[in-house]
Image: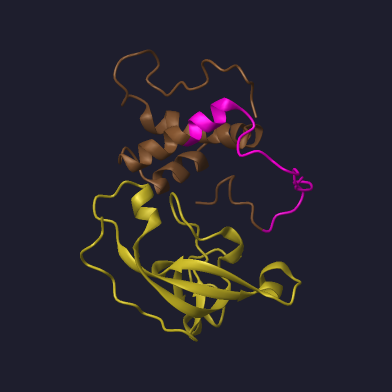
Chain colours: A brown, B yellow
Amino acid sequence: MSRVNDVGGQTGFGRLEIERDEPPFSADWEARVYALNAALVRRGVYTLHEFRDAIERMPPQEYLAASYYERWLRAIETLTEGRTGGGTGGGADVRTGGGAGRG
Amino acid sequence: MGESGAVPPRFAPGDRVRARAGDPDGHTRLPRYARGQTGRIVALTGNWPLADDVAAHRPAPRNEPVYTVAFDARALWGEGGHEVTLDLWQSYLEPAAESAAGPAAGEEPV
């Protein structure tokens, strides 16, 4: 399905800004999201293809407004909804603590 | 997943192929810009579970040949003297001769 992520060859998105000496993560919560996704894929909770599909299924207005790792977090929440034991909301909450803001 | 029932290869290096023009349901690894475009098989990379099926959590994903396919950049973008290569599953492709006259019936022109 043609989804909002499929922008190859499209123009009008502006220049790609290349950040010199860019750190791997711009905030601690991004590193946690990265590690959480790797752990969930390796444990077979979902596959990388399911993960990509979940990102692509974001409503276009949310997808375009979200940062790279915000999209990852949204996909993790989508794929783990109802699969976590206890707690509230059922989704992943890795943005507690740290308080380094959004990337 | 998909270890059994591997789909045999339909194409060989050098074959002209056309990426399917239709817009498949759900997840696909065939980018929009390549749909309906004609390219050339560069290499067979082996059989891999079809991403579309894996993303849909189908219990027995099709285990299809994946090819490296080269497209003329000028055909895709209207300019450029280089080739664009994509790794594409077999079901994304059809022989170029089948559709030499244009998109198949029921498919949107791209």
Which quadrant of the view contains residue A62? top right
Is residue A40 placed above or below B1 in the rendered structure?
Answer: above
Is residue A69 placed above or below B17 in the rendered structure?
Answer: above
* Residue A22 percent location from the top left of the image: 69, 41
- Which residue is at a point 24% across and 55% down the rendered structure image? B60
- Which residue is at a point 34% across and 42% down the rendered structure image? A42
Residue placed furthest toward the left: B4
Quadrant (top left/top right/bottom left/bottom right) for the C terminus of chain A: top right
Residue placed furthest toward the front: A21
Magenta-tinted stretch: A9-34
- Which residue is at a point 38% across and 13% down the rendered structure image? A88
Q: Is residue A73 visible?
A: no
Magenta span main SS: loop
Residue placed furthest toward the top: A88
* Residue B64 percent location from the top left of the image: 34, 67
In front here: A36 or B59?
A36
Image-based side of B45 in relation to A9, left or right: left
Is residue A13 placed above or below B7 in the rendered structure?
Answer: above
| Magenta stretch: includes residue A83 | no
Number of marks in picture: 0
Image-based side of A26 in relation to A52, left or right: right
* Residue B67 percent location from the top left of the image: 45, 72
* Residue B87 percent location from the top left of the image: 49, 67
Q: Is residue B78 visible?
A: yes
Image-based side of B9 in relation to A26, left or right: left
Which quadrant of the view contains residue B52? bottom left
- Which residue is at a point 48% across and 22% down the rendered structure image? A94
